[in-house]
């Protein structure tokens, strides 16, 4: 095969093919339109492979030097935007290899010794994804820092805590935000775990069965930084599994979906809190839009879109799961369909993380509105019950007594704390004037001074713990 023949993919296979591919089939089967995003990983993987071939005496030093030089030029061309991507060459791998051969001749053709596109593409996607995951984990840490900062500033701010979206008990707004820090911390843990299984080397599996060349796969793994915490090379141990496994893609999409679900829940709360009926917060104008017809409107577009994009990411997870479900071993062309959902998942999650770092930092908190809402919902009823328990009443009886008190307060249109002492004593003789401290929102908050509770003390302790953890 001559150098320029490689420009035509239909001629890149073998003499076996007697007719060219139609334009439609070419477009249908090509991935270069999207997988060119993998170019850096592809070159990095190829250089590690060439270095090992040379060290093993499979490739001459001169050829190796040609390959290194050619790849440097290709890198420069791609970075400068002058590299010509050809649909005829199907994918990123064939495009780069063909260009290499044009630039350095036979040395370029020797690069593919002991390798197949099957182990090559699996390696490229893993290399690309492991770096993206590391960047996402960094952004998750940044988002947690921002949330912790806002939580610290609002440790004393009282928010009605809800269950069933009914006012339940007062909570610190800081405490509420720290719940999201817990979620995003778990997301980071999950991603780190996915990254560990992503960062393993398929190269050396060749098409499916391994190769007859004496490859040093562990050397390639070490060159590519595919090593465990102890610096041991991480190499896929079964060639069939190596080329066909896309667990890392499914796992990543699952971890990303869970993270987006957290964003979606936070978004839903932001949308509710910003609505006129709640009025608990305001979002900075730069995250909102107006209405073309209703001049009074300021819509929380960013959280709404994050909620919407959650569906899109979860859809990618479903797509990847379905992509894999019917595939026999080993590699099948189906796998080419793993890329777009993966790319879009990374892009969507990255943008969402970045935008929320800013959005959360720019929230305006309205403590009076939060407190007013907490007062409206008899949020300290449980505190009154607990108070009666401390006076010797069994909890179930206390619960019943308080229900009567709440009923009366509702009839009178006032808060529990506005009922006079003699009226309260009518419900139970053990009630003294120390009850009013218990019935106040702040008293209720301060009382929940247990590990993980909402007392501002505890919130500040959690803030300190997170700060020490996040650096
Ligand atoms: N573009 C292909 C993919 O993304 C590369 C591997 C092709 N291998 C093959 N035997 N056709 O999966």
Image: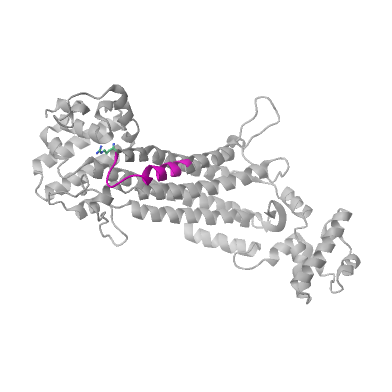
Find residue 471 and report its horizontal and vertical position in percent.
47, 57
Find residue 319 and report its horizontal and vertical position in percent.
43, 41
Where on the picture, by quarter, is residue 415? Answer: bottom right
| Residue 185 appears in the figure | yes
Judged by its main secondary structure, the magenta piece is helix
387 or 466, nearer to the observer: 387
Residue at the image point whose x is 54% and y is 44% from the top: 356
| Residue 471 appears in the figure | no
Side of 47 relative to 339 (left or right)? left
Q: Quick one: which residue is furthest to the top in this view?
A: 23
Residue at the image point whose x is 14% and y is 47% from the top: 53
311 or 224, nearer to the observer: 311
Find residue 197 and report its horizontal and vertical position in percent.
34, 54
374 or 336, nearer to the observer: 336
Is residue 323 rendered magenta in the image? yes
Q: Quick one: which residue is furthest to the bottom in this view?
A: 392
Where on the picture, by quarter, is residue 402? Answer: bottom right
- The quadrant of the rendered image in which ligand 1 is seen is top left
Quarter of the N terminus within the rendering: top left
**Which residues are drawn in magenta?**
315-332
Q: Is residue 329 above or below residue 77?
A: below
Find residue 2 and report its horizontal and vertical position in percent.
11, 28
Residue at the image point whose x is 52% and y is 59% from the top: 466
Q: How is the image coloured?
A: one colour
Side of 346 relative to 275 (left or right)? left
Is residue 356 rendered magenta in the image? no
């Amino acid at each position: 095969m001559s150098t320029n023949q490689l420009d035509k993919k239909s001629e890149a296979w073998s003499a076996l093919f007697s007719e060219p591919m139609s334009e439609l089939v070419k477009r249908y089967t090509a991935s270069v339109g999207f997988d060119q995003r993998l170019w850096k990983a592809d070159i990095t993987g190829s250089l590690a492979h060439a270095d090992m071939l040379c060290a093993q005496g499979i490739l001459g030093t001169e050829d190796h030097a040609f390959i290194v030089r050619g790849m440097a030029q290709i890198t420069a061309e791609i970075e400068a935007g002058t590299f010509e991507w050809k649909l005829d060459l199907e994918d990123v791998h064939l495009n780069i290899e063909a260009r290499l051969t044009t630039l350095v001749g036979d040395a370029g053709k020797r690069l593919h010794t002991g390798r197949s596109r099957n182990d090559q593409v699996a390696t490229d996607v893993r290399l690309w994804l492991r770096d993206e995951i590391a960047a996402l984990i960094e952004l998750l840490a940044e988002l947690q820092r921002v949330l912790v900062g806002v939580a610290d500033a609002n440790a004393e701010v009282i928010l009605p805590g809800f269950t069933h979206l009914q006012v339940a008990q007062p909570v610190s707004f800081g405490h509420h935000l720290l719940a999201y820090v817990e979620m995003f911390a778990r997301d980071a843990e999950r991603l780190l775990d996915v990254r560990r299984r992503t960062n393993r080397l398929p190269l050396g599996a060749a098409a499916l069965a391994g190769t007859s060349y004496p490859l040093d796969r562990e050397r390639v793994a070490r060159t590519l930084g595919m090593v465990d915490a102890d610096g041991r090379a991480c190499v896929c141990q079964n060639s069939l599994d190596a080329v066909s496994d896309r667990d890392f893609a499914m796992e990543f999409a699952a971890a990303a979906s869970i993270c987006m679900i957290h964003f979606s829940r936070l978004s839903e709360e932001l949308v509710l809190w910003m609505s006129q009926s709640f009025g608990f917060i305001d979002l900075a104008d730069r995250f909102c839009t107006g209405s073309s017809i209703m001049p009074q409107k300021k819509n929380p577009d960013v959280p709404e879109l994050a909620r919407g994009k959650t569906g899109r990411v979860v859809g990618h997870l479903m797509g990847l799961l379905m992509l894999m479900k019917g595939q026999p071993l080993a590699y099948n062309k189906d796998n080419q369909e793993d890329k777009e959902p993966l790319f879009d998942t990374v892009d969507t999650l990255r943008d969402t993380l970045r935008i929320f770092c800013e959005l959360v930092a720019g929230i305006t908190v309205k403590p009076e509105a939060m407190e007013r809402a907490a007062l409206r919902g008899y949020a300290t009823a449980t505190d009154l019950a607990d108070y009666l328990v401390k006076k010797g009443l069994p909890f179930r009886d206390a619960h019943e007594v308080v229900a009567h008190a709440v009923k009366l307060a509702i009839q009178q249109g006032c808060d529990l704390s506005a009922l006079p002492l003699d009226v309260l004593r009518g419900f139970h003789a053990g009630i003294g004037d120390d009850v009013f401290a218990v019935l106040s929102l702040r008293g209720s908050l301060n009382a929940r001074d247990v590990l993980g509770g909402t007392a501002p003390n505890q919130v500040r302790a959690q803030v300190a713990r997170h700060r020490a953890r996040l650096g």
